[in-house]
Amino acid sequence: MAMSQGLSSSEAAQRLLRDGGNELPAAQPRSLARLLIDVLREPMLLMLVGCSAVYLLFGEPRDAAVLGIAMLAVVGITLYQERKTEHALAALRDWSSPRALVLRDGQRVRIAGREVVVGDWLILSEGDRVPADAVLRDANHLQVDESLLTGESVPVRKHGDAALARLDRPGGDDTALVFSGTLITSGHGVAEVLATGKHSELGRIGKALQSQAPGASALQRETRALVRRVAIIAIALSLLVLLLYGLSRGQWLQAFLAAISVAMGLLPEEFPVVLTVFMALGAWRMSRQHVLTRRLTAIEALGAATVLCVDKTGTLTENRMTVSQLLIASGETFAVSDQPLPESTHQLIEFALLASRTDPFDPMERAIRELGLHDQIDAGHLHRDWRMLREYPLSRELLAMSQLWQTAAGDQRVIAAKGAPEAIADLCHLDAKARATLLQQVTAFADQGLRVLAVARAELMHSNVAIAGDDGSVGATVQTGQTEQAEPIERTAQTASTTAHDYAFEWLGLLALRDPVRPQVPAAVQACREAGIRVLMITGDYPGTAISIARQAGLAAPEAVLLGRETEQLDDATLAQRLAQTSVIARAIPEHKLRIVKALQASGEVVAMTGDGVNDAPALRAADIGIAMGGRGTDVAREAAAIVLTDDNFRSIVDAVRSGRRIFRNLRRAMAYLIAVHVPIAGLCFLPLLFGWPMLLLPAHIALLELVIDPACSIVFEAEPDEPTQMQQPPRAADSELLSRRDLLLAVGQGSVLLLAVLIVVGWARWQGLAEPVQRALGFTLLMLGNLALILSNRDGGWLPFGKRSATNTALSWALSATLLVLIAVLTAPGLQRAFRFALPTIAELGMVFALALALLYWLTRLNRRRATTGP
C-alpha cells in the first residue's frame, strides 16, 4: 500500500468493525444492587443490621434508628470506595485514545483516536500523543518520551524502517517503534499502525491492572476475626442465659428478654463503627497534610509497611532536567548556581541555545533555555532577532543537531551544533589525545548520574580539514598543509551543504544535565530507614544514573544493582533473596515492577509502592499500599493507588507512615477498651440470675452505655497524639494480630475487676436493705464511672496524676463532661429516673461509689503502665 494514499474510508470502517475501537475494553461494572449485596454480606455490616433489628423488635426505635444511620454511613462509604476503584480502567481508556492525524483516501484527516485501525498511516509531529502502537516508515529528528511505559527520564531517538513488520518491547534508542500513549518531543514522522486497543502495549498494562483486585487489608481481616470471636461468645452466653432463666424460674418470656439484653450488651456492633471512625478521621487529618486517602484502611496498612518501592523519575527526582555543570574548551569546570556565570562560559551557553529550538518540548532543550534566560549570560548572547535558515536534525549516523542562523543585519551566518559528545568530537575532528581527554570528562560526569551534551560552533565551510595544534588542546583549525581550504558560510549561502560535516566546527565544551533529586527526599529516606522501612528504587534508567540518584537519595547499598532483565531469569525464591540484598533495580519495565512487588509479598513483606506513570498502575494496584503522585501523576496511577500525595512531596510518605502507626496504636487501645467495658455489661446481665437478684441492666441502660459512651470513647482514642518514639520502632509483624493474647487477657482482666467492683457495691446495697431502684442506681453509677476509668487508664501513660505525659485532647474533655452530665441527669431528673428505674442515692452512698471509682482508676493506670514498661 502506498504511503501517500493510506487506507480507504471503507476499508478503515471494515477494520474498525472487525477489530473494535482503539480503546481498552470496558471493565464489566457491577450494578448498584450487586455492589449493595456484596457490601451487606460483610460480617460487620450484618452485625449492625442484626442489632438494629433487635432494638426495633423490642421497642427501642430511637436506638434502632441510630444504628441504622451508622449502618447507612458504613454502606455509603464502602460503596463510594468500590466505585472509585473502577475508575482506573476508565482513566486508562481516556489516556489511550487521543486525537490522531491519519492518511485516508490520500488525504490527511484528523479523527478520534478510538477510530484508528491497524494499517492506518499516522502523521506524527512534535507535541503529538501517539494513538496506537506503530512502526515508523519515515522519521526526521524524531524523539519520543516513553517514560509512561519505561520510566526512562529522557526522550529516546527513533528512526524509520521500511521493512519492519512486528512489535517489540518499548525502551532504548534507535528503534523504529512508537507506542500508544507516548509523547513526540521533537521531529516528525510517518508510522504504520500494527496494534490498537487491548493489543497495544498500553492495552497489556490495562489487562494487568484489571487482573489486580485489591484484597482486604490486614486490619480488616483481623477486625473481622475479632468480631467473629466476640459474636460467638455473645451468642453462647445469650443461649446460656435463656436456658438458666427459663429452667430456674419458669419465666420463658422474661428469659428471652434477658437473653436479648445479653446479646445487646455483647454483640460487637461498635467494632465496625470504631474502625470506620478511626479511618475516616485519619483520612481527614491526612488530607490536611496533602495526603488523599482513596481506601481508608490503607492508612493503617502503611504504618505496617516494611518495604517502600519507589520509582525514580518524578518520585525521587523532580522529573525535569536542569543544567548542573559546564565544562569549557580550556578544561575548566563550572557549577551552575543562582550566581551569574563567568564570561568564559557565555559562548558555550550561547551556542547551546542556538542549537536548540526556541519553543522546545525536549526536556534537555528546556533546561538549556531556562539556563540562558535566567540572567546567567549577557542579553547580547541571546540573539532573539536572529533568523534560522536551516536545520540539520539528529540522525542515526550523526547523534547531533545543528542549526544555521543569520544575524539580524544579514551580514553574517553561523552554525551551532549540540549532541552526543562523540558525535560533536567527530564534527570537530578531534585527535586521539583530545578524544581520550573527552572520554574521561564524560565518564566523570556520567558517574555523577549526569547526562552530557557537547556543543560546537562554525563560521566557515571546508571540504577537507586537518587537525592542528601540537599542544593537543580540544579544538580544530581549518588548514590542509599550508593552504586554507575553507570559505565563509555567507559566501555559500545559496549552496549550503546538506550535511553538517562540511562545516569547520570549533569545540566549545560540555553541558552536564541532571534530573535533580527532590530536596526533601534524603531526609525522608533516612526517616524510613530509622522506622525500619527499606526503600527500594525501581527505574527504567541505566545503572549508572540509578546508582547516582540512589546515592544522592541516601538509599542503603546504592551500588548493589539488580537489572530488570535479571529478574526474568531468576525464580521466585532467588529473586526474593536478591531483592533482600539490593536497593536499586535498573532498566525495569512494568512487568518487572509487578513481579518484584509480588516476590516481596511472597517473602512476607508489606509493600508500599509509589509511582506516577501509566506503567506504575499494575504495581500500584498489586501492592499492599499504592501511593501515587497527584500533581505530576497520571489519572491512571491516581485511580489505581490507595493513597495520593497531592503535593508530590516525598516527605508526606513519612507523615503517612507516622499517622498509620498512630492510628493502629490508638485503634488497638480502643478495641481493648471495648472488650474490657463489655465484660461488666455481660456479667451484670448474667450473674444476677445465678445470685437470684433482679435484673440490674435493662435494654435502656445498655443503649445508654453503648450509644452515648462508646462512640465518644472511639473519638477520644482516635484523637490521641503521636508517641514520641513511634518512628524509631520497627514495623509491626505482618502476621501480628490486632490484639495479642496478652492484650485480650489484660482487657478481660480490667473488665472483670470493674464487674467485681459493681457486684460488691450492689451486694453491699442489698445487704443494707436498700430499695431495688437504689441498688440499680449505685451499680449503674459505678459502671459509668468505671467506664471513664477504663478510658483514662488505656490512654498513653494514663490520666494526668499518674501518667508520663500531661497532654490531653479536646475529645477527652467532651467525653468526660458529657458522661458526667448524662449521669447526673438520669439520677436526678424524675422522668429519666422512672424511665431507667432509678432512685437517687444519698450523698454518702454516692461518695463511696466515687471513691471506689478513683481507686479503680489508680489501679488500672498502674497496671497499664507496667504493661508499657515490660512491652507487649
Image: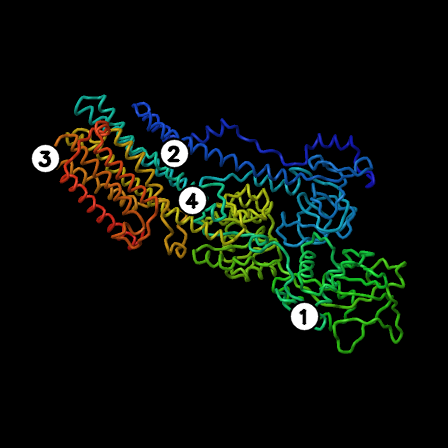
Nearest-to-viewer mark from 2 and 4: 4
Q: Which mark is residue 342?
A: 1
- Which of disc 3 and disc 2 is earlier in sequence? 2
Q: Which mark is residue 282?
A: 4
Q: Nearer the viewer, residue 64 or 507?
A: 64
Amino acid on which the number 4 mark rests in the picture: Gly
Q: Residue at x 67, y 64 (%)?
A: 376
Residue at mark 4 to residue at mark 1: CA–CA distance: 53 Å
Residue behind mark 3 = 767
Nearest-to-viewer mark from 4 and 1: 1
648 sits to left or right of 679: right
How packed mark 1 is, by other alpha carbons closer than 10 Å (few <14, some 14-19, many 20 or more), is few
Total marks in image: 4
Q: Which mark is residue 744?
A: none
Measuring from the top left, give residue 868's x and y in whole percent: 30, 53
- Which of disc 3 and disc 1 is earlier in sequence? 1
120 sits to left or right of 478: left
Measuring from the top left, give residue 597's x and y in whole percent: 52, 48
Nearest-to-viewer mark from 1 and 3: 1
Residue at mark 1 to residue at mark 3: CA–CA distance: 99 Å
- Which of disc 1 and disc 2 is earlier in sequence? 2
Q: Which mark is residue 44?
A: 2
Residue at mark 2 to residue at mark 3: CA–CA distance: 43 Å
Measuring from the top left, give residue 170's x and y in whole percent: 66, 48
Measuring from the top left, give residue 368's x and y in whole percent: 69, 59
